[in-house]
Image (cartoon, rainbow, N blue to C red):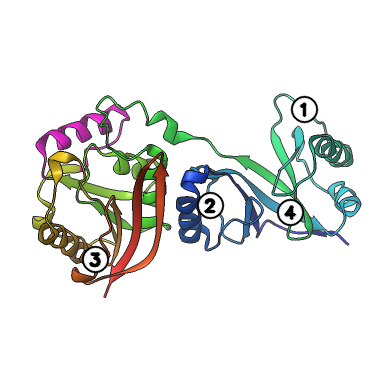
Amino acid sequence: MASTKAADRYLYQISYHEDEAELCFMEMRALLGAEPEEGCIVTDRELPPSRSPFIRQRLAVLLEAAELDELASAAAQLDMEGRTYKAIFVATGGSQIYEERLAIERQIGRSIRGRADMKQPERLIGIAYARGQWLLGELERAEAAWLVHNQKPQPYSTALSTRVARAVANIAAPYTEGVKVIDPCCGIGTVIIEAISMGIDIVGCDVNPLAVRGARTNLAHYGMPNVVRLLDMRQAEGSYDAAIIDLPYNLCSVMEPEERIEMLRSAGRLAPRVVIVTTEQIDEDVAAARLVIADRCVVRKSRFERQVLLCSRQ
């Protein structure tokens, strides 16, 4: 029999490019406590679908059934509250072919009592098949807010992409309420902009005055507050829940191991949770800075690779 309930489970449809697969899985472990299976994650954690660059849409589960016919019968009991609706099939791995998806949408759509609107519905009703069950509920699509942040007035060729920056911020701060984050090597503010757009309380600093000026220009462009200052991270003070450090790696920023270890120690002093982005193998330096690697991934772009390390204090 189908069961009807208030939403206490959520299906997240996940999509990623193979070059960012490891990053996606690492971010999902931090945000949702699970890795995608068959293109989705089912969990009891409620998260805005626009939070992650890898979440396409979220289904708040209201009904579930072992058989599609049972789900259609239960759908007749849904209260549309006088609003128009549209039934949408949410594809997961191994899902039905296009014609079958349309047939499922029609079957469920006809079962719902109310007025369907294919063009401008007031509610989206999603249907999915996952973990051996048919699921139905309120569907919310993600908005790719990070794409707007690609048009910074002060870009930098070696800066993180907005997608990677957003994922890194989420790995550092999977929960946002009451959490304080610092980006002590903030560059032009790519990570800070993504963090602020998600409601993360973050500040930044950089030793390069040109970078700080660029970060302030970029923040102002998006109507965000000036939360960066000119400061060597080794002189930064305060206590934070997480620190994000994208280590310098261009030809003008060649760094000796001793200097890198000092920077990593400073990050660990500022926060117990440290996310490091690096183009080099620095496991020994991380250990020397008295940090422990809890999770990691590699992000690829053509032949260029970055490592993302989630660390904690020893």
Q: CA distance from mark 4 to mark 3?
A: 46 Å
* Mark nearer the N terminus (2 vs 1): 2
Q: Which numbered disc, 4 or 3, marks the residue closer to the eye?
A: 3
Q: Amino acid at mark 2?
A: Leu
* Mark nearer the N terminus (2 vs 3): 2
Q: How many labels sit on residues?
A: 4
Residue at mark 1: 117
* Mark nearer the N terminus (4 vs 3): 4
Residue 286 circle label:
3
Q: Where on the picture, by quarter, is residue 101?
A: top right
User: Is 135 situated left or right of 55 in this image?
Assistant: right
* Mark nearer the N terminus (3 vs 1): 1
Q: CA distance from mark 4 to mark 2?
A: 16 Å
Residue 52 appears anywhere in the view = no
Q: Which residues are magenta?
A: 207-227
Residue at mark 4: 62
Q: Amino acid at mark 1?
A: Asp
Residue 228 appears anywhere in the view = yes
